[in-house]
Amino acid sequence: MDKNEELALFTLKADELIDSKYIIADIKILGLLKAIAASDTLVAIFKNCLTGFDYPLAKEKYLVKSKYLAEGKGEFVLPPSSRELLAFVFSVLADIEAKRIDFPQFINKYFYEDGSFSAGYAAFLNSMIKPFKNSVKMLMESVIDGKLQDPVEALLEEEERKKAEEIAAIEEKRKEKELSEKTYGESVKAIREILLKDKTKVKNSRLKDRIKDEYILVIDMLANAVELDDKDGIRYAFIAYKFAVKSNVFLFFGRAKKVAKYLKDIVNEL
Protein backbone atom coordinates (compact mmCIF):
# COMPACT_ATOMS: atom_id res chain seq x y z
CA MET A 1 0.00 0.00 0.00
CA ASP A 2 1.09 3.55 -0.63
CA LYS A 3 0.49 6.28 1.95
CA ASN A 4 -2.87 7.32 0.47
CA GLU A 5 -4.12 3.72 0.62
CA GLU A 6 -2.84 3.38 4.20
CA LEU A 7 -4.72 6.53 5.20
CA ALA A 8 -7.89 5.39 3.41
CA LEU A 9 -7.83 2.04 5.24
CA PHE A 10 -7.24 3.71 8.61
CA THR A 11 -10.06 6.21 8.00
CA LEU A 12 -12.42 3.39 6.95
CA LYS A 13 -11.72 1.35 10.09
CA ALA A 14 -11.93 4.40 12.35
CA ASP A 15 -15.30 5.36 10.84
CA GLU A 16 -16.55 1.78 11.22
CA LEU A 17 -15.73 1.98 14.94
CA ILE A 18 -17.31 5.43 15.28
CA ASP A 19 -20.50 4.22 13.54
CA SER A 20 -20.68 0.90 15.43
CA LYS A 21 -22.88 -0.29 18.27
CA TYR A 22 -21.23 -1.41 21.49
CA ILE A 23 -22.03 -5.07 20.81
CA ILE A 24 -19.42 -5.21 18.01
CA ALA A 25 -17.01 -2.59 19.42
CA ASP A 26 -14.30 -5.15 20.21
CA ILE A 27 -14.27 -6.33 16.56
CA LYS A 28 -14.07 -2.76 15.29
CA ILE A 29 -11.28 -1.83 17.72
CA LEU A 30 -9.29 -4.84 16.55
CA GLY A 31 -9.89 -3.81 12.93
CA LEU A 32 -8.60 -0.32 13.64
CA LEU A 33 -5.46 -1.64 15.35
CA LYS A 34 -4.84 -4.00 12.42
CA ALA A 35 -5.15 -1.08 9.99
CA ILE A 36 -2.46 0.75 11.97
CA ALA A 37 -0.22 -2.33 12.04
CA ALA A 38 -0.60 -2.75 8.25
CA SER A 39 0.77 0.74 7.58
CA ASP A 40 4.53 1.33 7.75
CA THR A 41 3.89 5.05 7.98
CA LEU A 42 1.39 4.77 10.83
CA VAL A 43 3.59 2.29 12.70
CA ALA A 44 6.44 4.82 12.48
CA ILE A 45 4.16 7.66 13.63
CA PHE A 46 3.00 5.70 16.67
CA LYS A 47 6.53 4.53 17.50
CA ASN A 48 7.64 8.15 17.50
CA CYS A 49 4.70 9.16 19.71
CA LEU A 50 5.24 6.27 22.13
CA THR A 51 8.98 6.91 22.56
CA GLY A 52 9.40 8.31 26.06
CA PHE A 53 5.64 8.19 26.68
CA ASP A 54 4.73 7.49 30.33
CA TYR A 55 1.42 5.61 30.12
CA PRO A 56 0.80 5.24 33.90
CA LEU A 57 1.40 8.97 34.38
CA ALA A 58 -0.80 9.78 31.39
CA LYS A 59 -3.68 7.78 32.92
CA GLU A 60 -3.43 9.94 36.03
CA LYS A 61 -3.52 13.10 33.91
CA TYR A 62 -6.22 12.20 31.38
CA LEU A 63 -8.50 9.84 33.33
CA VAL A 64 -9.39 11.92 36.36
CA LYS A 65 -11.97 11.98 39.14
CA SER A 66 -15.10 13.85 38.12
CA LYS A 67 -15.80 17.13 39.90
CA TYR A 68 -19.52 16.88 39.34
CA LEU A 69 -20.51 13.20 39.41
CA ALA A 70 -20.90 10.75 42.27
CA GLU A 71 -18.00 9.04 44.05
CA GLY A 72 -16.22 6.52 41.85
CA LYS A 73 -17.05 8.34 38.62
CA GLY A 74 -14.40 9.97 36.47
CA GLU A 75 -13.94 11.78 33.20
CA PHE A 76 -11.61 11.79 30.22
CA VAL A 77 -9.48 14.91 29.73
CA LEU A 78 -8.33 15.46 26.14
CA PRO A 79 -4.49 15.49 25.95
CA PRO A 80 -3.11 18.90 24.92
CA SER A 81 -0.95 17.69 22.02
CA SER A 82 -1.41 15.33 19.08
CA ARG A 83 1.63 13.33 20.23
CA GLU A 84 0.11 12.72 23.68
CA LEU A 85 -3.34 12.06 22.22
CA LEU A 86 -2.10 9.44 19.76
CA ALA A 87 0.10 7.69 22.32
CA PHE A 88 -2.59 7.66 25.00
CA VAL A 89 -5.58 6.57 22.91
CA PHE A 90 -3.52 3.92 21.11
CA SER A 91 -2.42 2.53 24.50
CA VAL A 92 -6.01 2.50 25.76
CA LEU A 93 -7.26 0.72 22.63
CA ALA A 94 -4.47 -1.85 22.92
CA ASP A 95 -5.43 -2.46 26.56
CA ILE A 96 -9.11 -2.84 25.64
CA GLU A 97 -8.30 -5.28 22.86
CA ALA A 98 -6.01 -7.30 25.18
CA LYS A 99 -8.70 -7.27 27.92
CA ARG A 100 -6.38 -5.44 30.31
CA ILE A 101 -9.14 -2.84 30.53
CA ASP A 102 -12.67 -3.95 31.39
CA PHE A 103 -14.41 -2.04 28.63
CA PRO A 104 -17.91 -1.81 30.15
CA GLN A 105 -16.48 -0.61 33.48
CA PHE A 106 -14.24 1.84 31.65
CA ILE A 107 -17.23 3.33 29.78
CA ASN A 108 -19.37 3.44 32.92
CA LYS A 109 -16.66 5.17 34.96
CA TYR A 110 -15.15 7.74 32.59
CA PHE A 111 -17.96 8.36 30.08
CA TYR A 112 -21.01 8.18 32.36
CA GLU A 113 -24.09 9.78 30.84
CA ASP A 114 -27.19 9.69 33.10
CA GLY A 115 -26.98 5.94 33.57
CA SER A 116 -27.41 5.16 29.86
CA PHE A 117 -24.68 2.79 28.66
CA SER A 118 -25.35 3.55 24.99
CA ALA A 119 -25.00 7.27 25.72
CA GLY A 120 -21.74 6.55 27.57
CA TYR A 121 -20.42 4.55 24.62
CA ALA A 122 -21.37 7.41 22.28
CA ALA A 123 -19.49 9.81 24.56
CA PHE A 124 -16.42 7.54 24.36
CA LEU A 125 -16.57 7.60 20.57
CA ASN A 126 -17.12 11.35 20.36
CA SER A 127 -14.57 12.52 22.93
CA MET A 128 -11.81 9.94 22.47
CA ILE A 129 -12.03 8.17 19.09
CA LYS A 130 -13.06 11.06 16.85
CA PRO A 131 -10.20 13.37 17.98
CA PHE A 132 -7.83 10.40 17.65
CA LYS A 133 -8.97 9.73 14.08
CA ASN A 134 -8.79 13.41 13.12
CA SER A 135 -5.28 13.84 14.56
CA VAL A 136 -3.96 10.77 12.74
CA LYS A 137 -5.63 11.89 9.51
CA MET A 138 -4.13 15.39 9.81
CA LEU A 139 -0.63 14.01 10.42
CA MET A 140 -0.85 11.54 7.56
CA GLU A 141 -2.09 14.22 5.15
CA SER A 142 0.81 16.46 6.19
CA VAL A 143 3.24 13.63 5.47
CA ILE A 144 1.61 12.92 2.10
CA ASP A 145 1.72 16.64 1.18
CA GLY A 146 5.38 16.87 2.19
CA LYS A 147 4.72 19.31 5.04
CA LEU A 148 6.11 16.84 7.57
CA GLN A 149 9.13 14.57 7.31
CA ASP A 150 8.29 10.97 6.46
CA PRO A 151 8.02 9.31 9.93
CA VAL A 152 9.73 6.16 8.62
CA GLU A 153 12.76 8.26 7.67
CA ALA A 154 12.55 10.13 10.97
CA LEU A 155 12.47 6.84 12.88
CA LEU A 156 15.51 5.52 11.00
CA GLU A 157 17.38 8.76 11.66
CA GLU A 158 16.53 8.55 15.36
CA GLU A 159 17.69 4.93 15.51
CA GLU A 160 20.96 5.91 13.81
CA ARG A 161 21.39 8.79 16.25
CA LYS A 162 20.86 6.50 19.25
CA LYS A 163 23.25 3.94 17.80
CA ALA A 164 25.89 6.64 17.34
CA GLU A 165 25.33 7.82 20.93
CA GLU A 166 25.74 4.26 22.22
CA ILE A 167 28.98 3.81 20.27
CA ALA A 168 30.26 7.16 21.53
CA ALA A 169 29.37 6.20 25.12
CA ILE A 170 31.20 2.88 24.79
CA GLU A 171 34.24 4.67 23.35
CA GLU A 172 34.15 7.23 26.15
CA LYS A 173 34.06 4.46 28.77
CA ARG A 174 37.02 2.78 27.06
CA LYS A 175 38.98 6.03 27.10
CA GLU A 176 38.10 6.62 30.75
CA LYS A 177 39.28 3.13 31.64
CA GLU A 178 42.55 3.62 29.81
CA LEU A 179 42.97 7.00 31.45
CA SER A 180 42.39 5.62 34.93
CA GLU A 181 45.20 3.13 34.33
CA LYS A 182 47.67 5.87 33.47
CA THR A 183 49.71 7.50 36.24
CA TYR A 184 48.92 10.94 34.85
CA GLY A 185 45.18 10.24 34.45
CA GLU A 186 44.13 12.78 37.09
CA SER A 187 46.17 15.50 35.37
CA VAL A 188 44.42 14.76 32.06
CA LYS A 189 41.02 15.00 33.77
CA ALA A 190 41.98 18.30 35.39
CA ILE A 191 43.07 19.77 32.03
CA ARG A 192 39.83 18.57 30.42
CA GLU A 193 37.80 20.43 33.04
CA ILE A 194 39.89 23.59 32.67
CA LEU A 195 39.63 23.61 28.87
CA LEU A 196 35.90 22.91 28.97
CA LYS A 197 35.41 25.89 31.29
CA ASP A 198 37.57 27.97 28.93
CA LYS A 199 35.34 27.10 25.96
CA THR A 200 32.20 27.91 27.95
CA LYS A 201 33.63 31.28 28.95
CA VAL A 202 34.55 32.07 25.36
CA LYS A 203 31.12 31.09 24.03
CA ASN A 204 29.35 33.19 26.67
CA SER A 205 31.63 36.20 26.23
CA ARG A 206 30.95 39.35 24.24
CA LEU A 207 33.90 38.79 21.96
CA LYS A 208 33.41 38.94 18.20
CA ASP A 209 32.55 35.61 16.59
CA ARG A 210 35.86 35.57 14.68
CA ILE A 211 37.84 35.97 17.93
CA LYS A 212 35.71 33.32 19.64
CA ASP A 213 36.42 30.84 16.83
CA GLU A 214 40.16 31.48 17.13
CA TYR A 215 40.19 30.93 20.90
CA ILE A 216 38.13 27.74 20.57
CA LEU A 217 40.46 26.43 17.86
CA VAL A 218 43.48 26.90 20.13
CA ILE A 219 41.69 25.26 23.09
CA ASP A 220 40.59 22.29 20.97
CA MET A 221 44.10 21.84 19.56
CA LEU A 222 45.51 21.48 23.07
CA ALA A 223 42.69 19.19 24.18
CA ASN A 224 43.19 16.91 21.16
CA ALA A 225 46.96 16.74 21.66
CA VAL A 226 46.44 15.72 25.29
CA GLU A 227 43.87 13.08 24.30
CA LEU A 228 46.24 11.61 21.70
CA ASP A 229 49.26 11.54 24.06
CA ASP A 230 51.10 13.55 21.41
CA LYS A 231 54.16 14.90 23.25
CA ASP A 232 55.33 17.28 20.51
CA GLY A 233 51.74 18.25 19.72
CA ILE A 234 51.16 19.14 23.37
CA ARG A 235 54.22 21.41 23.41
CA TYR A 236 53.24 23.25 20.22
CA ALA A 237 49.57 23.53 21.23
CA PHE A 238 50.46 24.82 24.68
CA ILE A 239 52.62 27.58 23.18
CA ALA A 240 49.61 28.75 21.15
CA TYR A 241 47.33 28.36 24.19
CA LYS A 242 49.72 30.32 26.42
CA PHE A 243 49.86 33.30 24.07
CA ALA A 244 46.09 33.16 23.51
CA VAL A 245 45.17 33.27 27.20
CA LYS A 246 47.73 36.01 27.90
CA SER A 247 45.98 38.17 25.31
CA ASN A 248 42.91 38.31 27.53
CA VAL A 249 43.96 38.05 31.18
CA PHE A 250 40.52 38.96 32.48
CA LEU A 251 38.88 36.03 30.67
CA PHE A 252 41.64 33.50 31.41
CA PHE A 253 43.16 34.73 34.66
CA GLY A 254 45.83 32.30 35.95
CA ARG A 255 45.03 29.70 33.31
CA ALA A 256 48.49 29.28 31.78
CA LYS A 257 50.16 28.40 35.11
CA LYS A 258 47.45 25.88 36.05
CA VAL A 259 47.56 24.11 32.70
CA ALA A 260 51.37 24.14 32.63
CA LYS A 261 51.47 22.39 36.01
CA TYR A 262 49.27 19.51 34.82
CA LEU A 263 50.97 19.29 31.42
CA LYS A 264 54.31 18.84 33.09
CA ASP A 265 53.01 15.67 34.80
CA ILE A 266 51.74 14.33 31.46
CA VAL A 267 54.79 15.18 29.33
CA ASN A 268 57.17 13.67 31.89
CA GLU A 269 55.35 10.32 31.59
CA LEU A 270 55.16 10.23 27.80
Image (tube, helix red, strand yellow):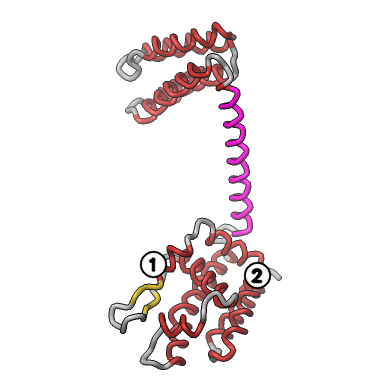
Tell me which secondary structure the magenta stretch mostly adopts. helix
Q: Position of residue 91 (x, y in %)?
A: 53, 69
Task: Find the distance from the CA under tag 1 to the CA under tag 2.
Answer: 27 Å
Q: Which residues are magenta?
A: 151-178
Q: Quadrant of the C terminus?
A: top right
- Image height of 71 relative to 23, above or below: above
Q: Could you say whether the residue bearing mark 2 is in a helix, strand or loop?
A: helix
Q: Is residue 2 left or right of residue 71?
A: right
Q: Quadrant of the N terminus?
A: bottom right
Identify the residue under disc 1. 61
Residue 107 in the magenta stretch? The answer is no
Residue 159 in the magenta stretch? The answer is yes
Residue positioned 53% across, 18% down in the render: 185
Instruction: Compare residues 189 and 213 and report the one nearer the observer.
Output: 189
Total tally of numbered discs in the picture: 2
Identify the residue under disc 2. 37
Q: Position of residue 80 (x, y in %)?
A: 40, 66
